[in-house]
Image: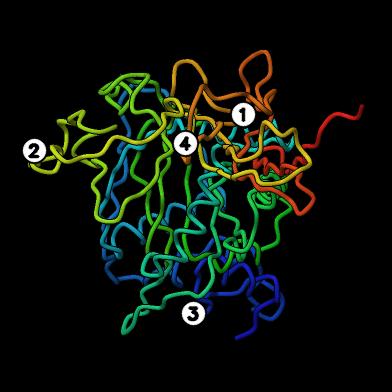
């Protein structure tokens, strides 16, 4: 069997068997044209043979004008692959809605901090790459007598082009950063639309993502890209009324807090909050536990995401800070009025927090309420300066007294 190198690459990418194809090249050699116009899996059945799925063709409609558009080689291959997939691969669909607000907030903060542009599709691709490594049964293919679980994620990305739909591959996607995945998608999409992709760039995918959200499609059932085992169909982000934690128990509840911990004591979760304030959602209720729930020592404010804590025992900062605690408040996206996004100080007396919190480091929100930075970890360096990790700005701030 003689075939050109290009014909072999295209056959591998499209899942076409060369055996039995009639070549139209010199000396009967199989060329790219033969592969692009061949049925998926091999040549058409011989005369007198029967097709496993009879074709249902349209009949002329009297008096109806019509325009017959011949199928391109790409459209013919796409049609045959889809038919093979739906008839040979058992399909079942699982649908779930997610709250996209955290993803939207993350994208906004990422763009503000990095200056680079990413799409929701980029985030979905990165999430699929990491999830597929954790769940190898979906990053797999059926081999007749065995299931092949792949050790790396080659992500097939559905891209619409003039002649149909192509699925070029991002290789080893689980190793790539979000920025690298975004750049790869843009490059593949541009070259796919300019018809500059190489045949091998379509081959070797292990799982596919198809996203119609940008077209306003909220939900659709994608067809598995053979020989893969799974495909993720992503729909549009839509606004709709939902019941979330803030709606159930209020914009100012439950406050984040700082507290000492006593061995064997019960602090309420999940049956009550901030002492004996009953949360009616958990079932069955536990009034016996609620009755002995201990209230925390010090409230830090609702939705502040107070994540960093460091006691100050140094000498560099003013003496008023000695013995107290610095707290990094990461800030929370799901409060109607932003809270946190700063570092506060709380004074201690006789081993207990006293007085109102004092703002020490702020300015992380711009005048439009967008996060330019978010303090998280706090620590004291050997010289007594305050260190603040900013995971949006990507820096560590070192706070020292103002020069005299």
Image mark count: 4
Disc on res. 20: 3
Residue 311 location, quadrant: top right
Q: CA distance from mark 2 to mark 3?
A: 76 Å
Q: Quadrant of the N terminus?
A: bottom right
The residue tagged with tag 4: helix, strand or loop?
A: loop
Q: Nearer the viewer, mark 4 or mark 2?
A: 2
Instruction: Say which label, 3 or 1, has the lower sequence index.
Output: 3
Instruction: Say which label, 1 or 2, has the lower sequence index.
Output: 2
Q: CA distance from mark 3 to mark 1?
A: 71 Å
**Disc 2 to disc 3: CB gap under 8 Å:** no
Residue 277 location, quadrant: top left
Q: Position of residue 315 (x, y in %)?
A: 76, 43
Horizontal side, residue 242 vs residue 66: left or right: left
| Residue that numbered label 4 is attached to | 212
| Residue that numbered label 2 is attached to | 287
Q: CA distance from mark 1 to mark 4?
A: 39 Å
**Disc 1 to disc 2: CB gap under 8 Å:** no
Q: Position of residue 52 (x, y in %)?
A: 26, 65
| Residue that numbered label 1 is attached to | 342
Crowd class of label 3 (few under 14; some 14 to 19; many from 20; radius 10 Å): few
The residue closer to the viewer here, 73 or 182, is 182
Q: Position of residue 199 (x, y in %)?
A: 66, 64
The residue tagged with tag 2: helix, strand or loop?
A: helix
Q: CA distance from mark 4 to mark 2?
A: 49 Å
Q: CA distance from mark 3 to mark 4?
A: 38 Å
The residue closer to the viewer here, 244 or 178, is 244
Disc on res. 87: none
Horizontal side, residue 369 vs residue 225: left or right: right
């Amino acid at each position: 069997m003689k075939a050109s190198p290009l014909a072999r690459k295209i056959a591998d990418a499209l899942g076409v068997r060369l055996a039995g194809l009639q070549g139209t090249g010199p000396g009967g050699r199989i060329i790219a044209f033969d592969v692009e116009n061949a049925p998926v899996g091999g040549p058409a059945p011989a005369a007198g043979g029967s097709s496993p799925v009879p074709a249902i063709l349209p009949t002329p409609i009297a008096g109806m004008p019509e325009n017959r558009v011949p199928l391109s080689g790409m459209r013919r291959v796409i049609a045959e692959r889809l038919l093979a997939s739906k008839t040979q691969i058992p399909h079942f669909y699982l649908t779930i809605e997610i709250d996209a607000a955290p993803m939207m907030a993350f994208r906004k903060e990422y763009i503000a901090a990095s200056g680079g542009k990413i799409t929701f599709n980029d985030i979905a691709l990165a999430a699929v790459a990491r999830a597929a490594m954790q769940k190898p049964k979906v990053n797999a293919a059926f081999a007749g007598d065995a299931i092949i679980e792949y050790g790396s994620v080659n992500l097939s990305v559905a891209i619409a082009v003039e002649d149909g739909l192509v699925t070029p591959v991002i290789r080893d996607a689980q190793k790539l950063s979000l920025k690298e995945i975004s750049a790869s998608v843009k490059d593949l999409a541009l070259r796919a639309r300019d018809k500059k992709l190489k045949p091998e760039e379509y081959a070797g995918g292990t799982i596919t993502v198809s996203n119609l959200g940008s077209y306003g499609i909220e939900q659709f059932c994608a067809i598995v890209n053979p020989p893969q085992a799974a495909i993720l169909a992503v729909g549009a982000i839509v606004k709709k009324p939902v019941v979330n934690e803030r709606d159930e128990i209020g914009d100012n509840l439950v406050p984040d807090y700082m507290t000492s911990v006593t061995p064997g004591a019960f602090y309420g979760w999940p049956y009550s909050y901030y002492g004996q304030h009953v949360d009616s959602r958990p079932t069955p209720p536990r009034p016996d536990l609620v009755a002995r729930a201990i209230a925390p020592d010090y409230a830090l404010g609702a939705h502040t995401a107070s994540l960093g804590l460091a006691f100050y025992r140094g000498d560099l900062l003013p003496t008023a800070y000695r013995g107290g605690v610095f707290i990094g408040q990461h800030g929370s996206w799901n409060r109607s009025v932003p809270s946190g996004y700063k570092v506060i100080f709380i004074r201690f007396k006789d081993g207990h927090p006293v007085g109102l919190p004092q703002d020490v480091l702020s300015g992380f929100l711009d005048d439009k309420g967008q996060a330019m930075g978010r303090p998280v970890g706090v620590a004291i360096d050997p010289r007594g300066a305050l260190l603040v990790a900013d995971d949006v700005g990507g820096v560590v701030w070192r706070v020292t007294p103002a020069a005299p």
